Image: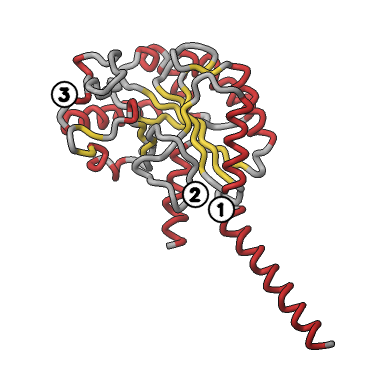
Amino acid sequence: MFRQFKGKAFLVILLLISCFHVHGQNGSVWNKRECAVVLSYDDAIDAYLDNVVPALDSLQLKGTFYLIGASPVVSKRLDEWRKVAANGHELGNHTLFHPCNGSLPGRSFVTAEHDLSTYSVSRAIEEIRLTNTLLKAIDGKERRTFAYPCGDLKIGNDYFYDQLRSEFAGARGVDPGLQTIDQVNPDNIQCYMINGQSAEYMIGLVKKARQSHALLVFLFHGVGGGHDLNVDLNEHSKLLHYLKQHERAIWIAPLVNVADWIHRNHNDNE
């Protein structure tokens, strides 16, 4: 009888240790939360300052805004962007002119002047570094992330970001996916681009991230207008309110914070 009790007690202890291990390694891996969510906004459009920043600030949520250095929305509203950064949002680098590879299908919008397929690697790097200088003049920060315009990674056969890796916390691409901490490629962080999807769809992605203990990055363009790729303002608001209601389980942070956290913690776990 005593041996049976000892055997059962031992199994219970093993079960408790196992549950604790799983919770510690997976359930609380993202800064002591179930998952991480990044809200990223591309192209520096007026709708971000008019619609998105007030919505985020009202809920005390922080996002990442990828600015095109030459955008008139940057130069004309410089003081507002400075306040955005001072309030804890990230100003990310989306290059100086947003060059994309115009030789690919569906790229009729690419101008000859800013066709990435005609760029040299040195030109691309120079323009990205100039944008970093501009962003530092706005927010005073050294650390930020990069976002590939149109998700284009290469010039010819060269991955141009390879020469910039040490200058950024990470780089966001456009390929969809949920990533555990061990799966994140800091040179091409996956995301879900939103264009017309409902709050139900976006919240569903968050729920999947919670279940799989993953990183979920949203990519927005227009929010309530301002871009051909757009999400309804009310649907965007529903997503933000869901995130706020569950922030004890979800780490909502700018990508620079998450990328630096991954770097520190992934290295600690290796």
Q: CA–CA distance between discs 2 and 3?
A: 36 Å
Instruction: Determine the residue positioned at 45% across, 17% down.
Output: 229
Location of the C terminus by quadrant is bottom left
Q: Nearer the viewer, mark 2 or mark 1?
A: 2
- Determine the secondary structure under disc 3: helix
Horizontal side, residue 207 vs residue 220: left or right: right
- Of the pair 256 and 201, the residue shown nearer to us: 201
Query: x%, y% of residue 57?
Result: 59, 26
Instruction: Determine the residue positioned at 30% across, 22% down.
Output: 98
Contact (Cβ within 8 Å) of mark 2 with mark 1: yes
Q: Earlier in the sequence, mark 2 or mark 1?
A: 1
Reading the image, the residue beneath label 2 is: 180
In the image, what residue type sits under mark 1? Val
Q: Which of the 4 image quadrants contains residue 244? A: top right
Q: Which of the 4 image quadrants contains residue 251? A: top right
Q: CA–CA distance between discs 3 and 1?
A: 43 Å
Horizontal side, residue 233 vs residue 13: left or right: left
Reading the image, the residue beneath label 1 is: 29
Q: Earlier in the sequence, mark 2 or mark 3?
A: 3
In the image, what residue type sits under mark 2? Thr
Query: x%, y% of residue 262?
Result: 45, 50
Q: Note whether residue 136 is visible.
A: no
Q: CA–CA distance between discs 2 and 1?
A: 9 Å
In the image, what residue type sits under mark 3? Thr
Horizontal side, residue 55 vs residue 245: left or right: left
Reading the image, the residue beneath label 3 is: 118
